[in-house]
Structures are given as C-alpha cells and as structure tokens.
Amino acid sequence: MATLQLQNITKSFGPTPILKDVNLSIEDKEFVVFVGPSGCGKTTLLRIVAGLEIATEGSIIIDGKDVSRDHPIDRGISMVFQSYALYPHLSVFENIAFPLRVAKRPEEEIKDRVHKAAAILQLEERLQHKPGQLSGGQRQRVAIGRSIVRNPKVFLFDEPLSNLDAALRGDMRVELSKLHKSLDTTMIYVTHDQVEAMTMADRIVVLNGGVVEQCGTPMELYLHPRNKFVAGFIGHPRMNFVPAMVSRVDDDGLHLRINEHNTMCLPVASEGIRSGDHVELGIRPEHMQLDEEGPIAMHVEVLERLGAHSMAYGKINGSDPFCASLPAMAEVREGTTVRLSIKPENAYVFDENGIALQRLGALQPA
Amino acid sequence: MTHASGDTLAYQGESRGPSQKQQARLNGLMRSQATFAWALIAPAALYLMLVVAWPLVETIRLSFTNANIGGEAYIGTANYEKLLSSRKFSQTISRTFYWMFLSVSLKIILGLIGATLLNAAIPGRALFRMLVMPPWIVPVAIGCFGWLWLYNGHFGIISGVLQYIGILDGPFEFLAYKNSAFYAAVVTDVWVGLPMVTIFMLAAMQGVPRDLYEAAYVDGASRWYRFRRITIPQILPVIITMSILSIIWTFNSFEIIWILTEGGPRSATTTLIIDTYKMAIANFKFGQGAARAVIVVTLLSVFSLVYLFALHQIKKRFEAV
C-alpha cells in the first residue's frame, strides 16, 4: 500500500520559480509518468518527492503521513538516477547490497536479498563484475537492483533510459513495464520522451513551465488534450496547427475558413466563440487522408518511406509547416502538391488562448 | 616519409615487387629515418647523460674512494662498512624515517580534512580555497625565515603567546632543544607541503559525481558513511599518489631543515640528506659523502619503484570503471 499526494508544491531557486502550485494524487500501485520539455520542473518535482530537494511550500503525503521534512530513508522511497550513480569501485553485488549495508542488515539476509534481486534482473552471472565491465543496459539493471532490495513503497526513476541507444531503450521499456507488474508497487517515472510516457504509464502528468498542464491516462491525453501544449506534446509525429477563422457558429458546431476556398464544419462546443474569431485547427498527421477533392493542399518537401507507412513533410498555405502520415505505397513524390482531407470529428480546435474546445463527437478511424 | 615509401611499395606491388634500385632507396630511407630519430633525441639524451648519468656514475665511483680535499685513493667498500657499523648513521636513518612518517602522515591527514572542509558548501568557500595557497606560492626559503622568527624565544609569537596564556614561564627557544627543534621542523615541513596535498585532494573530491552521494543519501547513508565508502575509495588513487610523492619530497627535504637548524641541535634534525651534505660539502669528505648519496639514490629508487607499481595497480583497478 502506498498512495502519494502532492499538495500545493511550490519550488523556487532564488527568485526563479521552478514549480508553481502542483497538486497531484497518485494511487497505490500506479505507474505515473511526469513528462515535459527540459526545464519544465519534472526532475525537480521528483527530487522533492525523493527528499533531495525541499519544497519551498506545500506538502508531500505518503500513505497519509506528511513526509515533507523527512529524510529520504524515512519516506520509504528509492530512486534510480539518470546516470545510474553506480559506485565504480564496488562490485555489482556490493552496489546492489549498498542500501542493506547502510541499514546494517545481517550478512545472510544481504546475500539472500541481493541474489533475489539479481535473479529478477538477470544479473546473477555479473555479480562479481565492476560496473565498468557492464553494458549500458546491465548498469541500468544494477541501478534498479539497488532500488529493489530495499522493498520501497515508491520507486522513483529519473530519465533512466536516456543514456541507452534506441533499440535498448525499447527493450528496457518493456522490461520496466514487466517489472512494475511483478513488483506491484507505486512507481513515478520522469522522462522528456512522450513515447516512453505513452507506452509505460498508467497515468501521465504533463508539466510545462512548472505547471501541471494535464493529468490523465495516455489515451485521455491523446484523445482529449486540454490545450495546445498537451496536444502538441503527446503524439508522434506532433499535431499540426493551422490558423483558421470562424466564419459561422451554429448548432452543428463551428464553421471554419481554413483557406481562401474552403470551410470546414467541426462538431465542437462553441460557447464564447463568435464568427470572426481567430482560432487554430489541430490536425494529427495520422488522421490525414489522400483525397483529390480534399480541402488541404500540401506541398511535399520531404517524403520518408518508413515501410509500414510514409511520412510527408512540407507546407500548406504557402508557409505553414505541415506533416501527414500516408499509406506506405502512396504515390506521392517530393516537390509535388497533394490534396488531403480529414474527417471533421478527428480535428481539434483551440481558441485564442490555446485552450481546446470540447469535441462533441467521438474520434473516427482515419 | 612513411607515406612516400608506402606509396612506392604499393605502386610496385602491382607489377612485380620492388626492383633492386627501389629496394636500395627504401633501405636508404629507413636508415635515414633512424638517423633522423637519433638526431631528434640526441639533445635530450646528451643532457641526461651530462646531468644524470655521469654524476651518478661519478658518485658511485667516488663512494669507493677516500676522496677528500687532498686527493683520492681507491679503498673498496670501506666507506659502506663504516656506515653500516656506525651507530650514529643508523640513528640518522631511523630519524629520517621517523621524520618522513610523521610529516607525510600529517600532510595526508590534514590535507584530507582540509580538502573535505574546502569541498563543503560553506559561504566564502572561494576565499578559503585561496587562503590555502600562500605556503605553496611563497618561496620555501622565505617561508622558513618567517618560521625562524616564529620559533624565536624572545621575539617569536609562539613563545610569546604561550607565555601570555601561562603555558610557559619564560622565553622558549624552540630550535635550541633536541625534541622541540625536531617537531618544529616537522611543523614547518608540513606547512610547506600541505597546500599541494590539499589542492590535489580537493580536485579529486570535486571529480566525484554528485549522483553517487545523492544515491547514497537516498539509501540512508550518513555523512561519515558516505565519506568512508564513496569519497575515500574514489580519491584513493590521489591519496596514494600524493603519499608516495610526499614521501619522496620529505625524504629529500633539505632547505627547510638547513635554514631552521642546519641539522642541529646535536644532530636532532639531521636527516640522511643533511648528513650527506654535511659530510661531502661541509667536511670535504667526498668519498664518505658519496657513499651516503648512493644510499639516498637507492632508497629513492625503491620509493619510485613503489610509486610506479602503485600507479600500475591503481590503473588496473580503475581501468574497468
């Protein structure tokens, strides 16, 4: 059992505010990912939970107990660092045993627990090696092993995969998800990589400029981003934003003029929107379709054939960058113009403040 | 040059291998390369022969003679036999090792403490770091003359303060008594050698990744535990290196003792190096002095070998990191 509440967490370094009034409630056994661009405060938030930083204001409650001023060891957390922070002069065994030695556990127990952790992480063959003799993935596992032996209530991970190559990162994502299932504990994971967030999280917390932009399951964030930032951050390749003007508002939703010749009617809540307002249309690349009658004309500059599908990068309306995901064998060439269409149900509209207008229909398959 | 010969070979290899003429040219080239290499190292080699090899050989030769201001004659190993049977010399040797042990341990322990304090996040840290430097920057001789005044019984601040607080009844000449002179020399030697040890240890401590400490902190390790199990092992190569270098420098430390006491009173501060100087230069007994110098060289060679061996071990141990 380990629930965790962050209440009104504020943190400033001197006059610079890093976190502004962060509130969050994390359930027992939940895998929560803090995601955001560099400098958004996600690592600082994790370090505050760990006890490596003290919040300027606010409290951290673990299992109903306020631990804001407690030493990390009394919080029942353990942390895996971005650099792994392995002790280079100690063997793998001693690295994993380190927290137990600090706690002065009996030798028998240390052996037993280290071997159990090593078995989970497939490190048994490597126990006598020094960290320098291990591959990046193995070092990562040693760092996780050091966390496991303590049986913490909450695991904290600070960008643990960022030092690994792409292929290994994919493998480790799966490993970590499996580990979460087998250990069945609360985990908080920090990353700047939205793919990691989408694939591993039970719940994602999107941070930007020290503020929680949105918090929800991966699909909630993908389908119902609260604002332009979240819409642009979640989903790969990122959402296209096209400036548009409201030409009419009626019961069907908003009628938008997207270029000189075309308007589109989008089923979104239109409260507070009047004709003549400037809004932005959000279109995910994967929702675009080749359509000779389509309202969007895209000049293709670069075409990436990825096998399963093709990515077209170019411009619309002369200058707005645009990206579309097309079928693998789409007959498109670089330097030509293609016409595209989108189902109105799949498009998003953001008002002048970047807030998403609520969609009235369900998302349709592209 | 290598390039040119390589090209020639490759070109010839396509047809039927190098012709005799080509081969001759190649041989000539390689010969001239070797000559060129010798020419390049010649100045350094010559320099070393003149200032290291020749004096060394000459010293060894002298040690088997009774050379003095009046002339020299071969006397075999008599100088060494005399040394080995001399009680005074064995006292000098044990004094030298005691001097070395005391001074080096103090430098290392104080250096470690100093570096730890300077590495701590305290206000005005930069100022403290700067204040460590003067003993190192000030010429040793000038520093020693300063200490000469400090140790002075009538005008020195140490005697004055000790009288003021009532520890001493009257003026005390630190350099006039056997024990106090010896320990006063140790203090000055530590004062001169400490900054470098401290700065090197500080540099090593700053090189320890912060993550290691944070990881240990999260795991509940106390300050002392982190120092013992992270800092010390991480900076061990520097501790070992500084220890051995300090041993060599302290063993060789001449001007500090010479300025303070000239090896006195009654040989209380005569270390091997002072003894050698006194015998050879002050008493003009070059042969006996040379025998002592050979012992100095032998001991220093042993220390250097230990140093090289330790470096090798350190490299082996940390190579895999």
Image (tube, coloured by chain):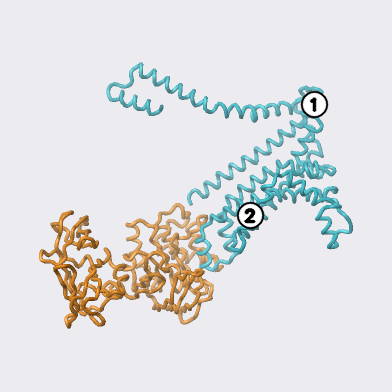
Amino acid type indicated by mark 2: Met
Is the residue A151 above or below the residue A90 in the image?
below
Chain that is cyan in the image = B
Q: Earlier in the sequence, mark 2 or mark 1?
A: 1
Q: Residue at x 81, y 36 (%)?
A: B86
Residue B20 coordinates in the image, percent (x, y): 35, 16
Judging from the image, mark 1 belongs to the subunit labelled B
Q: How many marks?
A: 2
Residue A332 located left or right of residue A60: left
Asked whether disc 2 touches disc 1, contact meaning CB atoms under 8 Å apart, the reply is: no
Element on which disc 2 rests? helix
x and y percent of residue B209 in the render?
51, 58
Q: Quadrant of residue A119?
A: bottom left
Q: Which numbered circle lies on residue B130?
A: 2
Chain A: give its colour: orange
Q: Nearer the viewer, residue B42 or B267?
A: B42
Name the residue rendered at 89%, 56% in the picture: B170
Where is residue B310 drawn, in percent x and y? Answer: 59, 45
Q: Which mark is residue B68?
A: 1
Residue A338's disc is none
Amino acid on which disc 1 is placed: Asn
The residue positioned 81% from the left and 48% from the top of the image is B181
Q: Residue furthest top?
A: B21
Q: Are marks 2 and 1 on the same chain?
A: yes
Is residue A264 positioned above or below B311 on the image? Answer: below
